[in-house]
Image: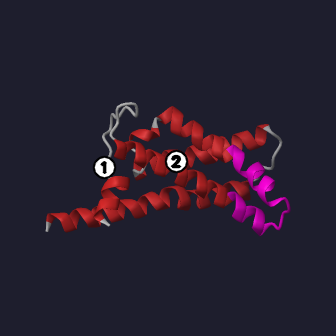
Amino acid sequence: MRAVLRNYCGDMPSRTNTATAPASAKTSAAVAAIADTALILAFAAIGRDAHQRGDVITGVLLTAWPFLAGAAIAWLVLRLWRGPLSVWPAGVAVWIGTVALGMLLRALTGQTVVLPFIIVALLSLGIFLVGYRLVLAGMRRIAGRRRRR
């Protein structure tokens, strides 16, 4: 368990260049990007299922793409690969970027943007995108305490 935490959840240097970053830093960024993508797709799939909409795969992708684009833009603009598994700033930044840019892209492409959907997206994506990072932070803290004993 400790080895997994060190490899995937270890503290990241604040000024890491991914071209020269250690393998664990690149792995952490890849794990975080995959997790973010999977959770955004899950959000879209759950929403489509709750509203009993057809076209499962294409429908989920149609719903998810603005949020995936928002997350990608947040990752790039804020260079979240420097500390991708941190709650702050990475978790909060990807959450807010995903929702804000996702809703903007939905509006620009004629998709529905209503207050109840914005609230659900904020809450759901907050739980998903910040939540797993909080769990990992707790696991890191517990592992750190055990190492000091």
Q: Residues within 10 Å of mark 1 (few under 14, many from 20)?
A: some
Left or right: 3 with respect to 41? Answer: left
Q: Which residues are magenta?
A: 44-66
Q: Which residue is mark 1?
A: 11
Residue 30's mark? none
Q: Amino acid at mark 1?
A: Asp
> Residue 120: in sight, yes or no?
no
Residue 33's mark? 2
Q: Residues within 10 Å of mark 2 (few under 14, many from 20)?
A: some
Instruction: Tell me which residue sits at (70%, 65%) in the image.
Output: 46
Label 2 to label 1: alpha-carbon separation: 16 Å
Q: Residue furthest left?
A: 149
Q: Which quadrant holds residue 74?
A: top right
Instruction: Tell me which residue sits at (66%, 56%) in the image.
Output: 41
Magenta span contains residue 9: no
Left or right: 122 with respect to 64? Answer: left
Q: Quadrant of the C terminus?
A: bottom left
Q: Which quadrant holds residue 80?
A: top left
Q: What percent of the width, then of the height, locates residue 31?
A: 47, 51
Q: From what the image shows, is residue 28 above or below residue 4? A: above
Q: Main secondary structure of the magenta part?
A: helix
Q: What percent of the width, then of the height, locates residue 117?
A: 72, 57
Q: What percent of the width, then of the height, locates residue 28?
A: 41, 48
- Identify the secondary structure beneath mark 2: helix
- Identify the secondary structure beneath mark 1: loop
Q: Amino acid at mark 2?
A: Ala
Q: Quadrant of the N terminus?
A: bottom left
